[in-house]
């Protein structure tokens, strides 16, 4: 809660603030349009007025980590009478984000990009949890402390978006694996899988 004078500490905070601002009010950065209270910003992917959110997320969190990879979880809630698909995700925390599932392959659990993304049934929910579907962050750019607030944007198949803030949380399982009872056997889609056949 105190701001150290060191420049290297100030900069990331400013960068994050900028991201948060642009996430909430997309027209702030360029030129303010004083006479247009509800001006839809051109292509900023920020729906300023969406009365009934198609999709919401309950208790979103990110596994606290140093650098490298981590994942985000929570329960997606579909508030409509139609099936909803989440097709991609984005966050300033990581330039590369994938929607992952965990499947059994050759007797161990591996994660891989989920075909078609996350599908939430009409009026239903879809849980993202360790050991199951998750939002995968590859190339995390900064440390995620417990309590950290990480903004996310999910894009739906119909072009809509869901913006939310996930909270950094220690995960008891630790390490880089999210499956119950695993011991570091999580492979990234076989890219650097060591072939032990
Ligand atoms: Cu993953």
Image (spheres, helix red, strand yellow):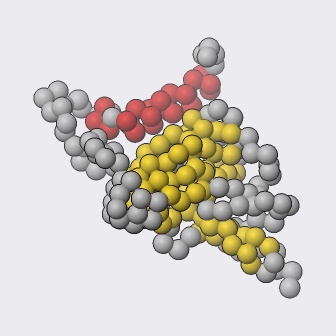
Which residue is at 40% across, 39% downward?
23
In this picture, is 4 found above or below 83? above
In this picture, is 160 found above or below 14? below
Indicate left or right for 150 with 145 as reference.
left
Instruction: Say which quarter of the image contains residue 186.
Output: bottom right
Instruction: Say which quarter of the image contains residue 104.
Output: bottom right
Residue farthest along the left direction in this orientation: 35
Indicate left or right for 38 with 184 as reference.
left
Which residue is at 42% across, 59% downward?
123
Q: Nearer the viewer, residue 129 or 45?
A: 129
Which residue is at 86% across, 85% downward?
197
Indicate left or right for 34 with 49 as reference.
left
Residue farthest along the bottom direction in this orientation: 197
Give the number of callouts.
0
Q: Is residue 163 in sight in this rendering?
A: yes
Q: Position of residue 179 (x, y in %)?
A: 75, 61
Q: Position of residue 44 (x, y in %)?
A: 32, 47
Q: Is residue 136 in sight in this rendering?
A: no
Q: Position of residue 6 (x, y in %)?
A: 63, 19
In this picture, is 53 found above or below 185? above
Which residue is at 83% across, 62% downward?
182
């Amino acid at each position: 809660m105190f701001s150290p004078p060191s420049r290297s500490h100030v900069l990331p905070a400013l960068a994050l603030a900028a991201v948060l601002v642009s996430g909430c009010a997309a027209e702030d950065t360029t030129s303010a349009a004083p006479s247009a209270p509800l001006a839809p910003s051109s292509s900023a992917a920020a729906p300023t007025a969406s009365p009934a959110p198609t999709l919401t997320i309950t208790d979103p969190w990110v596994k606290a980590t140093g650098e490298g990879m981590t994942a985000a979880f929570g329960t997606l809630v579909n508030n409509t009478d139609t099936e909803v698909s989440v097709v991609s995700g984005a966050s300033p925390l990581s330039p590369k984000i994938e929607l992952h599932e965990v499947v059994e392959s050759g007797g161990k659990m591996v994660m891989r990009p989920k075909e078609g993304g996350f599908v939430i049934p009409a009026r239903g929910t879809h849980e993202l949890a360790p050991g199951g579907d998750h939002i995968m962050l590859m190339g995390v750019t900064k440390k995620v402390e417990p309590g950290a607030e990480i903004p996310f944007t999910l894009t739906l198949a119909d072009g809509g978006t869901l913006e939310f803030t996930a909270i950094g949380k220690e995960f008891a399982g630790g390490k880089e694996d999210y499956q119950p009872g695993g011991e570091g056997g999580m492979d990234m889609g076989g890219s650097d899988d060591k072939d032990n056949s």
